[in-house]
Amino acid sequence: MAKYVKYILYLLFGLGVLLSVLFVSNTENMGMLDTYIYYAYILLGLGIVLAVVLPLISMIQNPKSIKKMLFGILLAVAVVGISYLAASGNPVPVNLSTEPTAFTFKITDTGLILVYILLTVSIVSIVTGSIVNMVKNR
């Protein structure tokens, strides 16, 4: 099974490199942009399907992991909820042909705040882990 996964990984990597080279070399042809975007959609869909199916398979094989998975899902929902509640949704003065809706501003603010929270948590985790590791190894 691992051998097939490695070959699929090489195939997807090669296809991505090929599309990138064709995209860069064909700047006049906007049809290549559509191909590149469709490839991104395919990879996104594949990632979503695998992100849903593989944990389900793992839960069936190991029912004790359900509690940990539910905790992780609830934590993720809580962080996104906090980000949504903290988002102001105030319009930003920009010169666009179509004015974004209030919902678009709210979702954009939510995404930015979510990135700030996750970045802060990751930096604090790295620093804390380093400090704990230094103290343990004394």
Image (cartoon, rainbow, N blue to C red):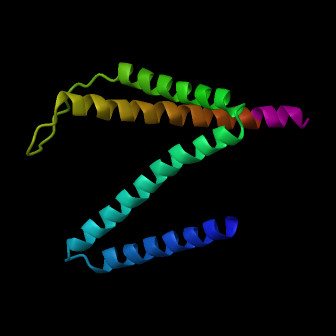
Main SS, magenta region, reads helix
Residue 70: quarter of image: top right
Rendered residue at 76%/33% (across/down): 131
Q: Position of residue 51 (x, y in %)?
A: 52, 46
Q: Nearer the viewer, residue 75 or 62?
A: 62
Q: Position of residue 135 (x, y in %)?
A: 85, 32
Q: Quadrant of the C terminus?
A: top right
Report the side of 123 relative to 35 (left or right): right
Report the side of 24 relative to 63 (left or right): left
Rendered residue at 32%/31% (across/down): 109
Rendered residue at 42%/78% (across/down): 18
Q: Nearer the viewer, residue 38 or 85?
A: 38
Rendered residue at 45%/74% (across/down): 15
Q: Quadrant of the N terminus?
A: bottom right
Single out the residue that lies furthest toward the right: 138
Which stretch did the figure color magenta? 131-138
Q: Nearer the viewer, residue 61 or 105?
A: 61
**Compared with residue 37, is residue 85 higher up or lower down, i.e. above or below?**
above
**Compared with residue 40, is residue 119 higher up or lower down, i.e. above or below?**
above
Residue 125: quarter of image: top right
Single out the residue that lies furthest toward the front: 60
Q: Position of residue 10 (x, y in %)?
A: 56, 73
Q: Position of residue 2 (x, y in %)?
A: 68, 65
Asked if the stretch drawn in magenta spans residue 101, the answer is: no
